[in-house]
Image: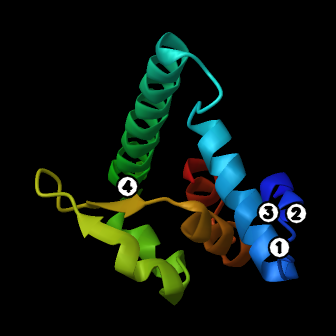
């Protein structure tokens, strides 16, 4: 920016903003550091990228906990959560309810059966 002004160039507001962003990018990349410092910045940025990707992968693979509900009690559940029910192959008298925030909220808001409320 200073160099453009010294040469008598008038930058528009948009050009000034773009130049400032580019300068910030270069500084984040360590342009003002010596070679060892730039290598360290690159290594830190690589670590941040790797950890961010790992974090997002972990979030996407999280499974919601399931609670076992006797089949006869499923009639007390609100219809909006029935799609979250799964049969338990080992025990036909039980159903697993995958509990996420939506399911918990719906069950607690609409179910009066105390055993289901406690399980959720």
Closer to us: 33 or 85: 33
State the separation of the CA atoms marked 4 and 3. Answer: 47 Å
Q: Residue furthest front?
A: 7
> Is disc 3 placed on a helix, strand or loop?
helix
| Residue position marked by numbered label 4 in the rendering | 60
Question: In front here: 43 or 110?
Answer: 43
Pointers 2 and 1 in contact (C-beta within 8 Å): yes
Tag on residue 9? 1
Left or right position of 96 against 117: left
Find numbered disc 1 in the image and state the secondary structure of the residue it sits on. loop
- The answer to whether the residue labelled 2 contacts the one labelled 3, judged by CB atoms less than 8 Å apart, is yes
Q: Which mark is residue 5?
A: 2
Residue drawn 79% across the image and 54% down it: 3
Q: Could you tell which of marks 4 and 2 lies nearer the N-terminus?
A: 2
Quadrant position of the C terminus in the picture: bottom right
Q: Are marks 1 and 3 in contact (CB under 8 Å)?
A: yes
Mark 4 vs mark 3: in front = 3
Label 3: how many residues lie within 10 Å, few (<14), some (14-19) or many (20+)?
few
Gap between marks 4 and 2 measured at Cα: 49 Å
Q: Is residue 39 above or below residue 10?
A: above
* Label whose residue precedes the other's in the sequence (1 or 3): 3
The CA span between labels 1 and 3 is 5 Å
- Percent position of residue 33, x then y: 61, 21
Rendered residue at 61%/44% (across/down): 26
Left or right of 23 on screen, residue 35? left
Q: Earlier in the sequence, mark 4 or mark 1?
A: 1
Callout 4–callout 2 Cβ contact below 8 Å: no
């Amino acid at each position: 920016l200073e160099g453009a002004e010294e040469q008598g160039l008038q930058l528009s507001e948009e050009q000034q903003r773009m130049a400032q962003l580019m300068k910030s990018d270069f500084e984040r990349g360590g342009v003002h550091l010596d070679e060892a410092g730039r290598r360290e910045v690159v290594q830190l940025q690589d670590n941040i990228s790797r950890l961010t990707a790992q974090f997002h992968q972990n979030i996407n693979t999280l499974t919601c906990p399931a609670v076992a509900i006797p089949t006869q009690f499923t009639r007390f559940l609100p219809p909006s959560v029935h799609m979250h029910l799964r049969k338990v192959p080992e025990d036909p008298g039980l159903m697993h309810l995958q509990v996420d925030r939506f399911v918990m909220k719906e069950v607690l808001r609409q179910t009066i059966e105390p055993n289901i409320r406690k399980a959720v």
